[in-house]
């Protein structure tokens, strides 16, 4: 019951925000987001690291098709849920400080979007996951197309085409997975736990894997399926872009661990090298393009392509430490990137709305608090020792070097490149000469209220990563075990068990 309340509370708040007078819309949605965050924190406090699925909700939904309304919390999605609720509070609070046309409709879509993301993270049924995964497209289509800037229609069209094609392929893969896994005379099921105990032939696994991979890599985005990213990042409103870049990008890579590896272990091992190549190319490609951008949004956009490449690398190293690092890095990247998007918004407000690095600069000495907060986020983004990103990337590379030395060595270049483009970002945005249109003033009260908690979390993850690692270890290791056993030829592959 608690997970159902958590999932649908933002939608209920958004619905109220859409129906009540527009003066109340922002506060109702903010209250709903805060309520969801409060529930997520209570789940963290109550979480048993030695347990499996907790707070389970499992009700038959469409019995003829074997589809259940099944939600649960475990070590794999605990911090994804916490991340989602925290960043929705940040984005909603930031939005509340700005005026929007049709605010009722804007906050309705914000609430619907949070419900869709939470549902995807909590779903324990493949069909239910597909429903929430596809639902995410609807509110973001309207948020970008209705409140975006510039070529927002073209950007939204490209975004929809890419993600809708990926979603349709995933739908076909999910249906095939359920039907082909059903033994003769057995009952059709889409339960993730039950599907891990059933068998698909190696050939069936391979084409189903490829369809899932296409959908998830588009959502990430990863090279070469990132074509929607530049236009969409330019067009989206900053609070919406914050959520798109930090939360939505994690749903696909999370699904590799939750669905693909445990249910399709043979195909995961078969296509391990392909996925590692995609990961490494994404790291190098994203890093090089991030260095060449003048648009601050696209610096973070291409940086995210590189960071998502690191996460995919950790997952498909098929090694517990790499997967552990991937889960930790999902959280790190989301928090740090969210903080940097807020910094971009604050700097743009002082540069007459321009988000070009060439139009910024020179305000660090007159805005020391803003400069200090931006510096912490920048150092975290380039994986400075002592930051959470350093721990995450260290675990990923450690796991990769175990069995995939060459891929780990090439990926290491991305760490050096990240230092280059993030230092360039910080220097051009806050130092050098003062931009011609720049107003040198300190961070305001609202922006500080939004940014400071994110920086606090960035510091906390660097100081005490065990808060996350201890609670995610058991579930993460269980998800990669079957695929790792196949990849290493272990006789223990037959004994692989899903998390209980």
Image: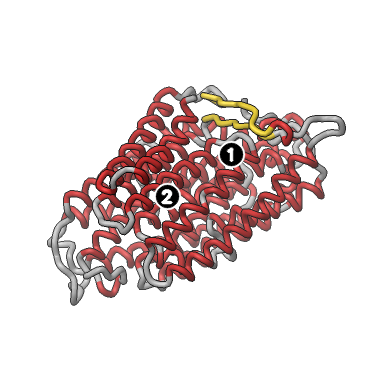
Examine the rendering and report whether any part of residue 95 can be seen.
yes
Q: Nearer the viewer, residue 229 or 427?
A: 229
How far apart, in angstroms, are the residues tagged by discs 2 and 1? 38 Å
Q: Position of residue 381 (x, y in %)?
A: 38, 54
Of the two numbered discs 2 and 1 in the rendering, the one whose residue sits closer to the viewer: 2
Check the image and name the residue furthest to the right: 184
The local crowd at label 2, few if under 14, some if 14 to 19, many if 20 or more residues have their Cα within 10 Å, is many
In which quarter of the view is residue 362 placed?
bottom left
Q: Position of residue 497 (x, y in %)?
A: 69, 29
Residue 147 image point, x, y percent: 37, 61
> In terms of image quadrants, where is residue 37?
top left
Residue at mark 2: 109
431 vs 416, nearest the viewer: 431
Q: Secondary structure at mark 1?
A: helix
Which residue is drawn at the image coordinates 37% and 67% (left, top)? Answer: 149
- Position of 286 with respect to 461 (left or right) is right
Q: Pick the residue in front: 335 or 185.
A: 185
Q: Which mark is residue 441?
A: none
32 on left or right of 403: left
Tags 2 and 1 in contact by the CB under 8 Å rule?
Answer: no
Name which of mark 2 and mark 1 comes first in the sequence.
Answer: 2
Does the image show residue 281?
no
Q: Quadrant of the C terminus?
A: top right
Residue at image position (28%, 74%) is 358
Q: Which residue is mark 1?
A: 320
The total number of labels drawn is: 2
Q: Secondary structure at mark 2?
A: helix
Compared to 50, does 308 lie above or below?
Answer: below
Residue at the extreme bottom of the image, as rendered: 436
Q: Pinpoint residue 205: horizontal percent, then vertical percent.
A: 76, 47
Q: Decide: few, some or many residues near mark 1? Use Cα within 10 Å; few <14, some 14-19, many ≥20.
A: many
Q: How is the image coloured?
A: secondary structure
């Amino acid at each position: 019951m608690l997970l159902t309340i958590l999932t649908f509370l933002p939608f209920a708040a958004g619905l109220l925000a859409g129906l009540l007078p527009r003066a109340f819309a922002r506060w109702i949605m903010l209250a709903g987001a805060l309520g969801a965050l409060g529930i997520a924190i209570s789940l963290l406090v109550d979480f048993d690291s030695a347990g499996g699925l907790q707070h389970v909700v499992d009700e038959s939904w469409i019995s003829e098709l074997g589809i259940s309304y099944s939600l649960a919390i475990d070590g794999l999605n605990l911090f994804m849920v916490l991340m989602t609720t925290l960043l929705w509070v940040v984005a909603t609070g930031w939005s509340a400080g700005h005026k929007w046309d049709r605010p009722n409709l804007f906050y309705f879509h914000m609430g619907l979007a949070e419900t869709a993301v939470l549902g995807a993270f909590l779903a324990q049924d493949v069909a239910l996951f597909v429903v929430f995964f596809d639902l995410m497209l609807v509110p973001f289509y309207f948020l970008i197309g209705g409140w975006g800037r510039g070529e927002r229609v073209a950007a939204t069209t490209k975004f929809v085409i890419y993600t809708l094609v990926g979603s349709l392929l995933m739908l076909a893969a999910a249906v095939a997975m359920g039907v082909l896994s059903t033994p003769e005379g057995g009952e059709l099921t889409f339960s993730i736990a039950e599907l891990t105990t059933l068998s698909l032939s190696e050939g069936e696994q391979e084409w189903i894997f490829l369809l899932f991979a296409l959908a998830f890599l588009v959502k990430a985005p990863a090279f070469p399926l990132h074509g929607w990213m530049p236009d969409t990042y330019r067009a989206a409103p900053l609070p919406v872009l914050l959520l798109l870049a930090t939360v939505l990008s994690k749903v696909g890579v999370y699904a590799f661990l939750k669905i693909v590896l445990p249910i399709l272990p043979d195909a995961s091992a078969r296509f391990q090298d392909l996925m590692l190549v995609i990961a490494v190319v994404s790291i190098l490609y994203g890093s090089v393009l991030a260095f060449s951008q003048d648009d601050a949004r696209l610096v973070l956009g291409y940086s995210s392509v590189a960071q998502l490449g690191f996460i995919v690398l950790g997952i498909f190293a098929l090694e517990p430490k790499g997967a552990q690092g991937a889960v930790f890095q999902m959280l790190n990247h989301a928090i740090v990137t969210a903080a940097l998007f807020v910094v971009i918004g604050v700097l743009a407000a002082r540069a007459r709305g321009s988000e070009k690095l060439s139009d910024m600069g020179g305000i660090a000495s007159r805005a020391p608090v803003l400069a200090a907060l931006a510096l912490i986020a920048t150092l975290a983004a380039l994986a400075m020792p002592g930051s959470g990103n350093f721990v995450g990337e260290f675990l990923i590379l450690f796991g990769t070097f175990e069995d995939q030395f060459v891929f780990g060595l090439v990926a290491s270049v991305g760490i050096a490149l990240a230092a280059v483009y993030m230092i360039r970002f910080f220097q051009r945005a806050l130092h050098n000469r003062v931009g011609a249109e720049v107003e040198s003033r300190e961070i305001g009260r609202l922006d500080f209220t939004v940014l400071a908690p994110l920086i606090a979390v960035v510091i906390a993850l660097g100081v005490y990563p065990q808060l996350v690692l201890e609670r995610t270890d058991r579930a993460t290791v269980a998800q990669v075990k079957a695929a790792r056993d196949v990849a290493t030829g272990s006789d223990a592959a037959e004994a692989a068990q899903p998390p209980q």
